Image (cartoon, rainbow, N blue to C red):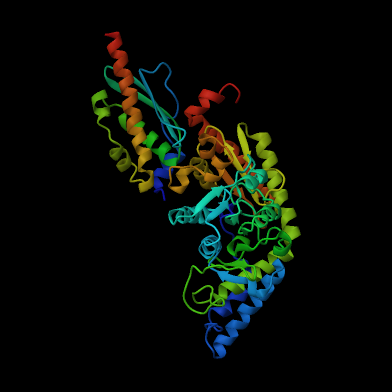
Amino acid sequence: MYNEKVMEVFKNPKNVGEIENPDGIGTVGNASCGDIMQISLRIVDNVIVDAKFKTFGCAAAIATSSTATEMIKGMTVEEALKVTNKKVVETLGGLPSQKLHCSVLAEEGIKKAIEDYLSKQKKEA
Amino acid sequence: MDKKPIYFDHAATTPLCKEALDKMLPYMTEVFGNPNSQHYYGRESVKAVDEARDGIAKIINCKPNELYFTSGGTEGDNWAMRGIAHAHKNKGKHLIISPIEHAAMIVTAKSLVKEGFEVDFMKVDEEGFVDLKHLKSIIRDDTIFVGCMMANNEVGTIEPIKQIAEIAHAHGAVMFTDAVQAAGVLKIDVKELGVDMMSMSAHKIYGPKGVGALYIRNGLKVESILTGGHQERMKRGGTTNVAGIVGFYEAFKIANRDIDKNFEYVSSLRDRFIDRILSEVPFVKLNGPRENRLPANADFSFKFIEGESILFSLDLAGIAVSSGSACSSGSLEPSHVLLALGLPDELAHGSIRFSFGKHNTVEEVDYAVDTIKSAVQRLREMSPLFKAEGEIKYV
């Protein structure tokens, strides 16, 4: 059901973990639907210099977490906000249709972590 | 992969045994006749089907004319439940099944509810055993059908079928049991158990896929669901699966001949596996009981991680298992069996079923335990739940 790329990323995911004292952090999903994703970001001068994830979920959820965090590294906050789940899925070479909802979590996780960053910025300002 | 993966999914299906294959082959080529045909070819096929029917009937202690060949477990379950509902609706429209039945029963129940029948579920305890007191409290004089599997496919619980049948009969209800996981694994005597109907399947016991049987006690009125020709004494239409039936009989005969030996060997693998997992992997829960459990079955929930990701981690390491997580089934709900046992969502999502077979070895079990330990740890290190709850205790 999964393509080789997805399995390869699942086997060797990148950016696993949690950034200490992150500039932005967000957790999305819940245990009842079987997926929880936490994204933490290091942001310097409006650029995402590091991104890490922790995910409770299926192989698709772990693979999309890895790919999404990999994609946003080096992006500005504005660019990262434009990363869609569709882009993440494309980068992975596609997901089975019943797994597409897992990729939504990655997009939402990034958005939530950035929102956290932006709200902290506001407070500081 | 140079080597074939270790197969720990015998509750899903088993490889066809050589003896059954050898018996089947001539019935696909030389002895190909339709048993309904009057001529030589037909008669030769009839002989084989009759021999299988006689042999299987003898093993489960029923008469040959009480046995109807089917396409397998799903058809048997559908036929029993729908067939009784439709044939007995003048007596009552109330049916009772366990909440841990196979989807073949659960989904049939839902469709009967749409037709105007009423279906209640008997409670099960946290190990999956039917609560007989609860069953007594919900059964009524207009209950026409009580259905409970002999052994659960996911958590391995062996149900007190005889006692359930007594309760059913005290209220005049028909007692059905789905013996798909039990037939050929446990000794079955339908008269002694007191069941009126029982479904079986060949492919769980090293027989071919697509064939099984339904036992229907003589004198019981059951409506057909496959209407058509004269096959199976007018009760089940469809050209007889001669080779399949021959293979079913051979596999069933062997399974019953070796029943004690297999039970002892397979349960020794299971116990070694369960003991090692419980002592070597932290934060696990064995689902189902230790006693009165199918010899092949071990089902665990691994806390903080999700079942499908465990399944694929093991798959990558060369171990084939199945999961009760929603993600592996394509639905959003985790296993209805685990939820009925009272497991919280997170644990139900993190379940893996291991089911052993007669060809598995102690070495395979030990390799699996070691692999599971590292796979589970790797996934836990990725899990946001693990940090929240487990970091301090788990070093």
Q: Residue at x 71, y 48 (%)?
A: B292
- Which quarter of the figure is the C terminus of chain A placed in? top left
Q: Position of residue B194 (x, y in %)?
A: 70, 60
Quadrant of the rendered structure where residue B183 is? Answer: bottom right
Q: Is residue A49 visible?
A: no
Q: Residue at x 47, y 43 (%)?
A: B326
Give the vertical position of B174 relative to B292 (above or below). Answer: below
Give the vertical position of B89 relative to A32 (above or below). Answer: below
Q: Residue furthest top?
A: A125
Query: Relative to B135, is A18 on the left or the right?
Result: left
Q: Position of residue B12 (x, y in %)?
A: 56, 55
Query: Relative to A122, is B213 on the left or the right?
Result: right
Tell how many labels.
Answer: 0
Q: Position of residue B222 (x, y in %)?
A: 56, 67
Q: Residue furthest bottom?
A: B39
Q: Nearer the viewer, residue B3 or B163?
A: B163
Q: Is residue B378 visible?
A: yes
